[in-house]
C-alpha cells in the first residue's frame, strides 16, 4: 500500500530524529567520561627503614638494593627482606620498600596485628606517634623499634592535574565505591596530592578481601 | 529595673515557646527512632556438620554437644572442635556449630582461604554447589568433604516484625553503613526473614577488620 507523504515534512522529521540521537549519544559518552575511576591497589604488609636501621640490620654503610619499581614513581621493592617479630607471632621475609625514610615504619593489616600480638593503630603513613613497636631481624642483625607499627589509612595518590580533573583537593576525604560480587564503599578516604605521585588508591589486604578485589580493579570516586 | 508587661501577652509567648520546644523534641526523637540500626556481629571461621560426618568424626551414634548458645535462637557452639586441613595449611580447634545440618559446610574468610590453599567462593549459606572441598580431622576420625567450603555472603537475620518496621523484605538486597574510624558501606547485603531469627547482621573477619569493627557495633540500614 502506498501512502502520500509530504516530502518536506518527512525530511524535517528525519533531521529531528538525527539531532536527538546525536544528543543522546553525546550525553551518554559524557556520563561515561565523568565517571571518576581510580585504579585500586592492595598493599601487602611491608617495612620502611631509616638509614640507621638499614645499617644496624645489614651492616655499616649498607644501602638498600632496588629489586623492582613500584607504581609510585621513585619507590621500589628491595632485595632485602626482614623478619617481623611480635609478642605472639612472627612474619618472615617481609618486603622492605625503598628508599630509606626518616623513620622506620611497619605497615600491617588488622589480621596481621592480631597474629603478631600488637595493637592495631590506624594511622596516616608517616605518623607513628602512639604506635606499638616490634623487633626486626635480618639474619645478620636485630633492631628493636619502640614505635612504628601502623595499620595504614586507605588513601589515594594523585597529581595536581588528577586532582583538578577529579574536583578534589589535597587532604580532602572522599568516598570510593568498588563494584564486585561483594561491593563496598570506603568512606573518608584520604586524598594525597603530589606531582610525583601516580593515580592509585591503596588499601590493605583486609580491605581487599572484604571487597573481593580482583586484579586491575577500579573504584569510583564520589566526592 | 522593673518593666511594665502585658501579662496576657507574656502568657501567650510562653505557651508558644513550650509548643515549639515540644515539637522540636518530638521531631528529634522521631529522627532517632527512624534511624534503622542493626547490631553487627563477626562470624569467625566455623564448621557445620551433617549427622553422617558427626558420626564419622566422633563415633557411631554421637550427637553434637551444646557448649554455648549463639545469638540466633536454636543455634549453638559445640564442645566438639575439628582441624580443617587444606592443600597449603591447616586450622586447628575450629568451632563446630550445631545443630547438625543436611550438608556439612565450612565457612571461612578470604584470608583463611589463602592460608588453606583453596579457592574463595562467595556463597549464600546453604548453597555449596561448585565450592572446594577440604579434610576435617577430629583426633578420632577424618572426613573428606568433596565440597562445602564457602566465604559466606554478608546478610541480616530478622523477624517478620523487624522486616515490617525496617521496610524491607526477605531476599531483598540492602546497603548497611558502619561508622568507625575507617567507615564502610556494605552494598547488596542479603536480608533473611524468619520468625525464629534475632536481628543481627553477620560479616566475616576480613569485613570486620576492614571496617575496624568495635564490640557491640551497629550498622545503619539504607534500603
Image (cartoon, coloured by chain):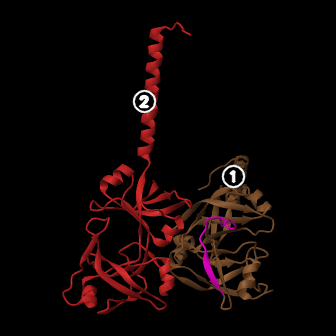
Chain colours: A brown, B red
Task: Please tell me in which quadrant of the rendered image residue B130 appears.
Answer: bottom left
Q: Secondary structure at mark 1?
A: helix
Task: Please tell me in which quadrant of the rendered image residue B125 appears.
Answer: bottom left
For the residues labelled 1 and 2, say whether their Cβ atoms are less than 8 Å apart: no
Instruction: Find the magenta span and give its range.
Output: A124-137
User: Residue drawn 53% across and 68% down?
Assistant: B210
Pointer 2 residue: B22
Q: Is the residue marked by circle 1 packed among few (<14), some (14-19), or many (20+) residues within 10 Å? A: few
Q: Quadrant of the C terminus of chain A?
A: bottom right
User: Residue drawn 42% across and 53% down?
Assistant: B37
* Mark sitting on residue A20: 1
Residue B118 appears in the figure: no
Residue B176 appears in the figure: yes
User: Residue drawn 47% across and 86% down?
Assistant: B116
Direction from residue A54 to residue B30 in the image, left or right: left
Instruction: Label the magenta part by its dominant secondary structure.
Output: loop
Task: From the viewer's side, name the closer residue of A144 and A221.
Answer: A144
Amino acid at each position: 500500500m502506498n501512502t502520500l507523504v509530504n516530502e518536506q515534512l518527512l525530511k524535517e522529521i528525519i533531521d529531528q530524529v538525527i539531532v536527538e540521537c546525536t544528543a543522546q549519544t553525546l550525553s551518554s559518552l559524557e556520563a561515561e567520561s565523568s565517571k571518576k575511576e581510580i585504579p585500586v591497589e592492595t598493599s601487602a604488609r611491608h617495612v620502611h627503614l631509616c638509614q640507621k636501621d638499614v645499617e644496624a640490620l645489614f651492616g655499616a654503610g649498607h644501602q638498600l638494593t632496588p629489586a623492582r619499581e613500584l607504581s609510585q614513581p621513585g619507590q621500589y621493592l628491595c632485595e632485602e627482606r626482614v623478619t617481623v617479630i611480635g609478642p605472639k607471632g612472627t612474619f618472615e621475609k617481609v618486603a622492605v620498600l625503598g628508599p630509606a625514610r626518616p623513620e622506620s615504619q611497619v605497615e600491617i593489616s588488622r589480621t596481621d596485628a592480631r597474629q603478631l600480638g600488637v595493637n592495631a593503630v590506624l594511622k596516616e603513613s608517616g605518623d607513628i606517634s602512639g604506635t606499638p613497636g616490634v623487633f626486626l631481624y635480618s639474619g645478620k642483625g636485630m633492631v628493636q623499634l619502640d614505635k612504628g607499627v601502623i595499620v595504614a589509612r586507605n588513601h589515594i595518590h594523585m597529581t595536581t592535574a588528577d586532582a583538578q580533573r577529579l574536583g578534589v583537593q589535597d587532604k580532602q576525604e572522599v568516598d570510593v565505591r568498588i563494584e564486585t560480587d561483594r561491593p563496598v564503599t570506603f568512606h573518608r578516604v584520604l586524598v594525597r596530592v603530589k606531582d610525583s605521585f601516580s593515580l592509585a588508591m591503596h588499601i590493605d589486604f583486609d580491605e581487599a578481601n572484604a571487597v573481593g578485589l580482583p586484579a586491575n580493579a577500579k573504584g569510583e570516586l564520589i566526592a
